Structures are given as structure tokens and as C-alpha cells.
Amino acid sequence: MAVKGVFASDQNIVGTRVGDFASSLLQVNPTGSAPMLALTSGMQSRPATDTIVNWFEEVKLTGRTKVSSVNGNGDGVLFTLADASSYVAGTVLLVEATGEVLLVTSVSGNTVTVVRSIGGTTATTITTSHYTQRIGNGHAEGSLMPQAVVNLGDVRFNVTQIFRNAWSITGTAKAIRYHTGSQVAKNRADCGFFHAEDIERALIWGVKHIGVMDGQPFRLMDGLLAQSTNHGGTVSAQSTNTKWSDLLTHFESVFAVNIKGKPNERITFCGNSVVTVINRIAALNSELELSQGATEFGLNVTTLIMPYGRVSLMTHPLMNENALWSKAMYTWHPGGIQTRYLRSTNIEAYDKNGTRIAGVDADQGVYTTELSIQQMAAQTSGIYTGIDTAAAEA
């Protein structure tokens, strides 16, 4: 039961006062209910200098692109590609499906002019179902300097969010002796717990909003889920059931790219339903794909052995609060997550005679934190939802 406002002497649990018949208090809380907040202590962190946090992000230029249209099939043919921004005269292309090699002679926007059958490869009709792959560049002796190519990244931004949680207890409630110990200490501890949990929820499920409240600026930050969804993370969902091959396809995409200079590793939070289904998949396929791990930050860790590496599945207590979250699996690259504190956690306490607010007969205080979170290279992340039914491979 939650009690709002100032904690008064008649709001204790029956039996906690000395002299009452019962004399015990049992509060059941999920163990480690703020694991992401805890894990960020070991990740990158930089101070924020404004309420808007900006960062610049570049995505590696891919050499592969799809053919959008074809004008003819001989030398000098014009191809329109989905993205020819990294191609210049002298680029050598491979048509993946046919093995033909092309030499780009000019580029205008996404339209390229090519010489066909380079290296004796066979010219075959090229259609809009084909992909081209850059396999290098070539230039003649004494050639002029080729056109320069620059990789222009994108500017991302998030905002800082102010978190505040208060505690309060009347002078009378403070004076009463309880078997459970000091109510002042307990209320302050509860407040810290609520504060950490509120930050945890926003770090994961927050959605960016900038507005006004009570005539003052008001901001909510994008959590990691929103950033993954909006900036290229792999998003999968169970249709009828989940098979081992479905997990392989999902994680193959997640591990396909990495952050330069960082280990290609991932952290994955999930609900109990996901762990149950994955263990059931292992049993159906007569393979031991999971090994129980140690407990880290109060979480049960299970290692999922993939061809691309090991994935640590950590059950997140908050994800078991509702059926949808329990069936979800969130994967992030720890090297791409960075907390940005504008104001570190500050505790204001008015719990001594003479320091109370406006003479109020109560000890009270407030926890305040202002921070944001940024996820760089969101393409390294993954979201898989609706995992509730296991199936064997056909």
C-alpha cells in the first residue's frame, strides 16, 4: 500500500508499533529493480551542459544497394540505384545475382552510367530485383583526381528529465517507537528506492516530450526503446510461435554491425516468459542452448550461445509487471549507451529541529536528479516482442 503526503502516526502497518500484538514487517520488492541504472555506472557518462543533449553519429557507408530502374542493357547503360551517394567515376561494381562486373563512368544523383562485362564477365539482363555491390575502384595511369566523397552523419538529440521523489513523516510518528526501527530511515530508504525505479522506467520506456507545466518548462526524455525504434534497431515480433531459426535471424541482424573500437557484445533484458520459451525451444530441438549463469546486480543471468557470440539474458523484474513486457526482449550494446547528468542526485533533508520548512511539524526531504540518456549506433540494438510460444524446427 502506498501512502501519499506526510506520513502520520495512524498510517503505520498494524503490529509495527512497540506494544502491538504483531511485531513484524514484510515488504516484498523485486530484487534489483533498477538494473539498467545500476549497469550505467559501469558505462560511459558525460556531464550535460544544457537541457538539450546533442551528439553526432555516422553510419558506415554500405557498398551494397538495390537497382531501382534500368535504361537499356548495353555499354553506357543508365542504372538508377536506391543510393549511389558513395559511388564516383571509377567505382567497380558487382551484380550479386549474376556475377557480372561493371565499371562506373559517371554518376548523377542516384543514376550511374557503366561499362559492362568487365574482366570478361558475362553481361546478363539486369532487373530491379538485383543488388549491386561495390568491390573497389580503378583508375587509369595519369588520371585526374577523382571526385571526393564525404560521409555526412546525422545529429541526434535528447532532453534532460527532472526526477523528484519526496519523503515526509510527522513529528509524532517520528517519536513513536517501532519494532521495525526508525520510520525516518525507512521513509528515506523507500524514497530512494522509488527514485531509482522511476529513473529506471524512463531509461527504458521513456518517450520524448517538450512542453510547459505550471508555467515552467517541462521535459521527458526518449528512453532506449524509443531510440532503438526510431534510429534503425532490429525490431522483430512473434507471429504464431518462436523457433530457434527466428532467434538466429534476429540476432544475426543485431550483431551485423558494431561500434568502432568496442567489443561486439550485447546486454539483453527480458521477462520470464522469454526465458521459459527459449528453454522450451532448447528442449524441443534436443539441444542444450542455455546455461544458467551467476547473479549480477540482483538479476538471474542465462547465457544464450549464438553463432555470433554469447548473449546474456537477464530477467528484468519490472518487465514481469505486465504480460506484454514479460514477452519482450530488449538488446543493447553497452558501448553505445551514455548517461548525461545535468544534475547528479541531490538529497535535501529537513529532519532536524529548527530546519523544518515553514515550521511544519514534520521531517521531510526530496531526492532530485536531472539526466538524459543517449544511445549511439542504435543499429546495434534489437527489440523482440510477443515471445510466448515455442516451436521446433520444421
Image (cartoon, rainbow, N blue to C red):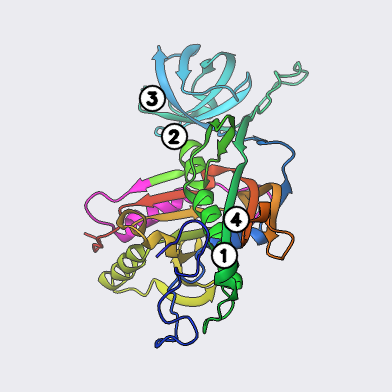
Please, what is the three-letter code of the amino acid marked with disc 4? Pro
Query: Mark 2 and mark 4: span between their CA atoms?
Result: 34 Å
Does any portion of residue 144 appear in the rendered image? yes
Q: Secondary structure at mark 1?
A: strand
- The amino acid pointed to by label 1 is Thr
The residue nearer to you, when weighing 282 against 275, is: 275
Magenta extent: 236-265
Q: CA distance from mark 3 to mark 4?
A: 46 Å
Q: Which residue is mark 4?
A: 334
Q: Are marks 3 and 4 in contact (CB under 8 Å)?
A: no
Residue 265 appears in the picture as rendered: no
Residue at the disc numbered 1: 170
Label 3: which secondary element: loop
Q: CA distance from mark 1 to mark 3?
A: 85 Å
Disc nearer the start of the sequence (2/4): 2
Q: Quadrant of residue 167?
A: bottom right
Q: What amino acid is at disc 2? A: Glu
Element marked by disc 2: loop
Which tag, 1 or 3, sits closer to the chain's start? Answer: 3
Circle 1: is it few (<14), some (14-19), or many (20+) Cα within 10 Å?
A: some
Q: Is 144 situated left or right of 182 in this image?
A: right
Residue shown at the point (28%, 69%) measured from the top left? 280
Magenta stretch: residue 263 in it? yes
- Mark 2 or mark 3: whose residue is earlier in sequence: 2
